[in-house]
Image: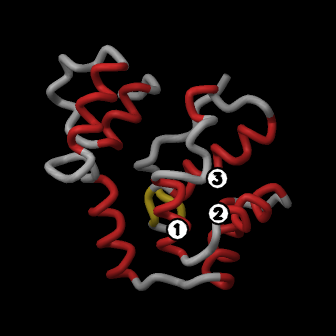
């Protein structure tokens, strides 16, 4: 079973988008780690599709038709909206800090405890948690 790429990795300058694409592809192939099956299209997946103004189901359908990450992102821009550089910068900064002194902080603490990472004071955001939980430095 496989994990998708880090949420920090950018596609077209946008964080998380590539991770969502990986999750869709890996699930379709039957190789997505089972821990990630329950939240497909929800959480951060829902946030990125909302940011781009394209429904998750339509993105999933487009991903399964094939194409590169950038081709799919361009399709999202044409189908939904193309954020400005400033909007992308704000999005990226917002997303990489999720869980740090915000409404996800309590969830981050519980997820760390469930994963045996409660002792890791260096994990202060959800992106850091995802990377640590999936074995990335």
In x, y percent, where is residue 132?
A: 36, 27
The residue tagged with tag 2: helix, strand or loop? helix
Residue 59 vs residue 103, the one in the foreground: 103
Mark in front: 3 vs 1? 3
Measuring 22% from the left and 20% from the top, which residue is drawn there? 118
Judge whether 9 appears above or below 34 on screen: below
Residue 17 image-quadrant placement: bottom right
Colour approach in the figure: secondary structure
Mark in front: 3 vs 2? 2
Residue 70 vs residue 111, the one in the foreground: 111
The numbered dot on residue 21 is 3
Residue behind mark 1: 12
In x, y percent, where is residue 42?
A: 54, 52
Mark closest to the chain's N terminus, 1 or 2: 1
In x, y percent, where is residue 133?
A: 40, 25
Residue 117 vs residue 106, the one in the foreground: 106
Residue 27 image-quadrant placement: top right
Judge whether 53 appears above or below 97 on screen: below
Residue 73 image-quadrant placement: bottom right
The residue tagged with tag 3: helix, strand or loop? helix
Crowd rating for badge 3 (residues with CA inside 10 Å; few <14, some 14–19, many 20+) = many
Judge whether 50 appears above or below 41 on screen: below
Measuring 35% from the left and 68% from the top, which residue is drawn there? 91
Mark closest to the chain's N terminus, 3 or 2: 3
User: Residues under labels 1 and 2: Cα distance?
Assistant: 18 Å
In x, y percent, where is residue 89?
A: 32, 72
């Amino acid at each position: 079973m496989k994990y998708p790429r880090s949420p920090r990795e950018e596609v077209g300058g946008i964080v998380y988008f590539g991770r969502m694409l990986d999750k869709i592809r890996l699930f379709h192939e039957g190789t997505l780690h089972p821990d990630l099956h329950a939240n497909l299209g929800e959480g951060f997946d829902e946030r990125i599709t909302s940011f781009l103004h394209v429904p998750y189901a339509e993105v999933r359908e487009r991903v399964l038709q094939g194409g590169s990450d950038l081709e799919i992102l361009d399709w999202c821009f044409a189908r939904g909206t193309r954020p400005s550089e400033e909007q992308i910068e704000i999005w990226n900064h917002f997303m990489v800090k999720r869980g740090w002194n915000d409404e996800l902080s309590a969830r981050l603490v519980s997820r760390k405890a469930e994963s045996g990472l409660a002792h890791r004071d260096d994990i202060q955001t959800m992106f850091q948690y995802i990377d640590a939980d999936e074995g990335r430095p």
